[in-house]
Amino acid sequence: MPEIAPRPLAELTTLRAGGTPARMVEATTAEELVDIMRGLWSAHEPWLVVGGGSNLLVGDEPFDGTVVLVRTHGIERLPDPRDGYARVRVQAGHDWDALVAYTVAEGLGGIAAMSGIPGTAGAAPVQNIGAYGQELVQTLTEVELLDEATGDVSTVPAADLALGFRTSVLKHHYGSVPLRPAVVLSITLDLPIRGHGERVVTGPQLRAALGLEADQAVTLEWIRETVLATRARKGMVLDDADADTWSAGSFFQNAIVSAAFARTLPAECPRWPLAPELDPVVVIPLDRFDGVVAPIVSSEPDVKVSAAWLIEHSGLRKGFKLPRSRAALSSKHALAVTNRGNATAEELAELARFIQGRVQSEFGLLLQPEPVLVGVEL
């Protein structure tokens, strides 16, 4: 087993918090990763897999187990069964933004709007990453998984992962365990071949974020550069010199609520229906028609509401911090809990709990954390 000297998890996570584990190993190939995990599972040892460390808040106490650093990398072009598409298989430890840069350089679309998202390719399907109207579910074809229950390696279609808004069967949600405990070994994407010329952006959310007219054409390179600049202005691109980026990105998920609940929120709270509201169609076979048509029951789609707006309008402005705390909201983005320098995991958690309480008191809604919490309670 490729064991290395343990390092504090504060050095390996973007929130810069976390104690030193008892053991640490590094996997540089998929085969090493499989062997390491099978060994830990057979020995029933506590374990924690860490890729880019961008979606983790780890407690201050030493982790009593083995931390597995996933350092696999590589992109493989594969034949695609569909004309006009390219298929790429990416190793789990490959840096996500490096993958996006590769696809843009190759003239491949589908993920340019997700430029600048920190972390690794293997973490991407776990919470179905997304930004500005693009989500991984739109391009993910399959993943290669190592199942904890059996120790088997299998190729699983994306349709079997229950990919939803920042969720999947692989995600360890706060207060629960994954529906399918497994380690991602690789992901496979089908990406449209766009080339390097200008094209009209079809997604309305992406057009709005980029300030584009409905018929305005731009290149993939322009989309990537503009998204990176937009994220940087919000402190959402990692920068060692900027404490506003010492975070896990958006700490709380945008809330998914019923349309009825959404109407109880102030009208100015940003919201987006999750599905179009269509008129239901009822088909009755002629041999069963008795001349009576039952009333049609129509249901409204759920609504996604802005967690950042809820936080700011509960009285917690950008830069807010508790007295004597080294944790604060980003001065650029109210959804990012940041480490202003040597903050403990408990200080970060204390601020998160305070935010939850204020939003719940003001709007009756309990925000859910987006990062995985290990040894920390909210």
Image (tube, rainbow, N blue to C red):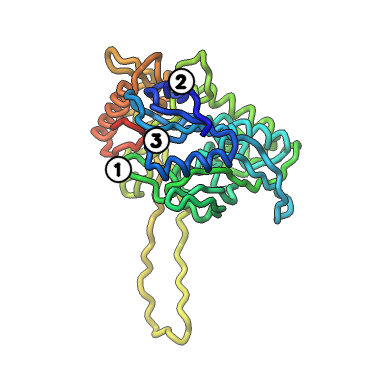
How many residues crowd around disc 2 within 10 Å: few (fewer than 14), some, or many (20 or more)? Answer: some
Counting from the top left corner in percent of width and height, residue 237 is at: 53, 24
Q: Residue at x 31, y 15 (%)?
A: 325
Tell me the residue that label 2 is attached to: 11
Q: Which residue is mark 3?
A: 372
Q: Secondary structure at mark 2?
A: helix
The residue under the point 42% across, 44% down is 41
Residue 279 placement, left or right of 88? left
Residue 248 lies left or right of residue 326; in this view the side is right
Q: Nearer the viewer, mark 1 or mark 3?
A: 3
Count of number-bearing discs: 3
Q: Quadrant of residue 357?
A: top left
Residue lying farthest to the bottom in this orientation: 287
First in sequence, mark 1 or 3: give its number: 1
Amino acid type for the residue under numbered disc 2:
Glu
Mark 1 vs 2: CB contact within 8 A:
no
Q: Is residue 272 left or right of residue 263?
A: right
Residue 35 position, x and y percent, is 52, 42
Placement of 203 over or under 362, stated as above or below: below
What amino acid type is highlighted by mark number 3?
Val
Q: Residue at x 42, y 18 (%)?
A: 331
Q: Residue at x 41, y 36 (%)?
A: 47
> N-terminal of the two: label 3 or label 2?
2
Q: Which of the numbered marks, if any, corresponds to residue 264?
A: 1
Question: Split into 4 quadrants, where in the image is the C terminus?
Answer: top left
Residue 242: x %, y % from top left = 49, 15
Question: Contact, CB < 8 Å: mark 1 with mark 3?
Answer: no
Viewer-side residue, 64 vs 257 = 64
- Kind of residue at badge 1: Thr
